[in-house]
Amino acid sequence: MKSFSAACREIYYGLSPRALRAQYLFLAFDLLVISYFVVTTFLEPVDWIITVDIIIGVILVIDFLCRLAAQRDRGAFLVKPMTCLLYTSPSPRDRSRDRVCR
């Protein structure tokens, strides 16, 4: 687990060329996901949109777990309000009101 944590820490917070490439890739993915949600918010939820939403959700869970592994103080990371907002905020298409970060 230590080598995995060290690798995650290097990728998310390192300054090596490999880490910087990964960080730019994460930024590009974030911009792509934001654009996707802005565009598809106004479309009817068809099968391909739901499938892409699930794929994005799985990728975000993996990202969250890797960021958690990269932290030295995981408890502090989990109680940060920003962590709660980033990973549990409902999608604009989500019409239910009970999925709010508490």
Image (cartoon, helix red, strand yellow):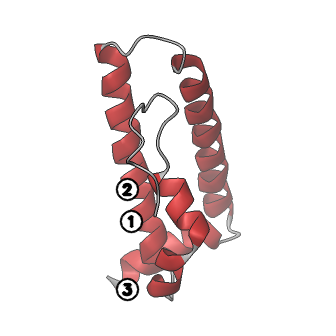
Work out whether residue 29 can be spotted: yes
Circle nearer the viewer, 1 or 3: 1
Q: Are marks 2 and 1 in contact (CB under 8 Å)?
A: yes
Real-space Cα distance between discs 1 and 3? 14 Å
Please tell me whether mark 2 sits on a helix, a strand or a loop: helix
Q: Who is closer to the viewer here, 4 or 45?
A: 45
Where is residue 14? Give x, y as percent: 65, 72
The structure residue drawn at horizontal position 42% and vertical position 42%, both measured from the top left corner, is 97
Look at the numbered disc 3 and give the secondary structure of its residue. Answer: helix
**Mark 2 surroundings within 10 Å by alpha-carbon count, few (fewer than 14), some (14 through 19), many (20 or more):** few
Q: Residues within 10 Å of mark 3 (few under 14, many from 20)?
A: few
Image quarter of residue 16? bottom right
Whichever of labels 3 and 2 marks the residue nearer the N terminus, that label is 3
- Could you classify mark 1 by the number of other residues whose Cα lies within 10 Å: few (under 14), some (14-19), or many (20 or more)? few
Q: On screen, 19 above or below 50?
A: below
Which residue occupies the foreground of this view, 97 or 5?
Answer: 97
State the residue position of label 3. Answer: 2
| CA gap, disc 3 and disc 2 | 17 Å
Mark 2 belongs to which amino acid? Ile
Q: Which of pointers 1 and 3 lies earlier in the amino acid sequence? A: 3
Is 62 in front, or is 98? Answer: 98
Task: Kindly check if marks 3 and 2 are in contact, taking CB atoms under 8 A apart as contact.
Answer: no
The quadrant in which residue 32 appears is: top right
Q: Quadrant of the N terminus?
A: bottom left
Label 1 is placed on what type of residue?
Answer: Leu
Query: Which one is in front in this view, the residue at disc 3 or the one at disc 2?
Result: 2
Q: Which residue is disc 2 drawn over? A: 62
Q: Which residue is mark 1?
A: 65
Residue 62 on image: x %, y %: 37, 56
Q: Residue at x 37, y 54 (%)?
A: 61
